[in-house]
């Protein structure tokens, strides 16, 4: 369980490093491409930090710091998802006029100011699910309506996000149904990492294949 969490964090930061490497490539002649790729890199960096903070929280942190570390790490996750949605609303699907990004920002503020742990957890769970569902819906729409390379890219990203959702929220549901937490973590982390790798490839495929 410890190893799976550690590998997940390393994998996420590796994807971020790949994004930053391609961001530095000289073939970027469009400002739009630069901001898109660096946004994806920041997203994976923050999710990686979230995973490492949670790793420390689960195995090394004293009980007195448990809730504070959980709140900080979950805050990184929510911020990363808001950044991802901003990138999508900025460069992929502009019809929503940044509404999802604004809602995500409001959820982050609520998460920060609410003191009650149970309420904060509910906001974190609802917020993270909401902020991951929107990118999935957008890329499903593109996959259905698009064609050629754009459709292929959208399908890859959609598959990655679906695996991420199964690896996180699916395992959470199994835990509620009585499956031992240790088992759900052992299965969930590698599954989530696989989803992040597939989604990351989809987001960066235009630049990796150049």
Image (spheres, rainbow, N blue to C red):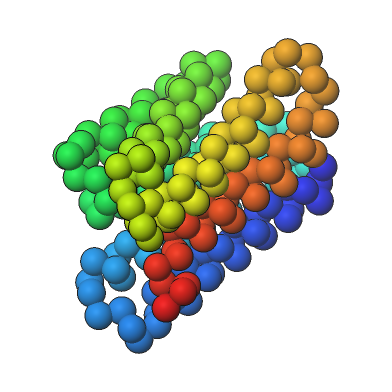
The quarter holding residue 111 reads: top left
- At horizontal 43% and vertical 54% (from top left) the residue drawn is 152
Q: Is residue 115 above or below residue 89?
A: above
Residue occupying the far front of the picture:
148
Quarter of the image where the C terminus is located? bottom left
Residue nearest the observer in this picture, 69 or 125: 125
* Residue 73 left/right relative to 194: left
Q: Is residue 189 above or below residue 182?
A: below
- At horizontal 38% and vertical 35% (from top left) the residue drawn is 137
Residue 86 seen in the current view: no
Residue occupying the far bottom of the picture:
26
Find residue 115 and report its horizontal and vertical position in percent: 47, 21
- At horizontal 43% and vertical 32% (from top left) the residue drawn is 133
Find residue 196 and report its horizontal and vertical position in percent: 57, 50
The quarter holding residue 70 reads: top right
Residue occupying the far top of the picture:
177
Q: Is residue 23 above or below residue 186?
A: below
Quarter of the image where the N terminus is located? top right
The mark total stands at: 0
* Residue 62 left/right relative to 156: right
Find residue 73 and report its horizontal and vertical position in percent: 56, 42
* Residue 52 left/right relative to 93: right
* Residue 65 left/right relative to 118: right
């Amino acid at each position: 369980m410890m190893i799976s969490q550690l590998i997940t964090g390393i994998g996420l930061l590796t994807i971020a490093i790949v994004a930053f490497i391609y961001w530095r490539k000289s073939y970027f002649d469009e400002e739009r491409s630069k901001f898109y790729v660096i946004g994806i890199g920041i997203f994976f960096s923050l999710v990686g930090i979230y995973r490492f903070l949670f790793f420390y929280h689960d195995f090394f942190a004293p009980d007195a710091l448990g809730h504070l570390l959980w709140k900080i790490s979950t805050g990184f996750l929510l911020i990363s998802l808001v950044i991802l949605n901003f990138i999508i609303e900025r460069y992929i699907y502009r019809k929503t006029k940044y509404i999802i990004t604004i809602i995500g920002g409001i959820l982050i503020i609520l998460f920060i100011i609410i003191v009650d742990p149970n309420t904060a957890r509910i906001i974190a769970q609802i917020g993270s699910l909401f902020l991951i569902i929107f990118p999935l819906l957008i890329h499903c729409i593109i996959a259905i309506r698009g064609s050629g390379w754009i459709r292929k890219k959208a399908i890859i990203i959609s598959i990655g996000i679906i695996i991420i959702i199964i690896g996180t929220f699916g395992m959470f549901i199994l835990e509620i149904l009585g499956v031992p937490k240790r088992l759900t973590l052992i299965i969930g982390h590698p599954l989530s990492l696989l989803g992040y790798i597939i989604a990351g490839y989809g987001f960066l495929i235009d630049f990796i294949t150049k």
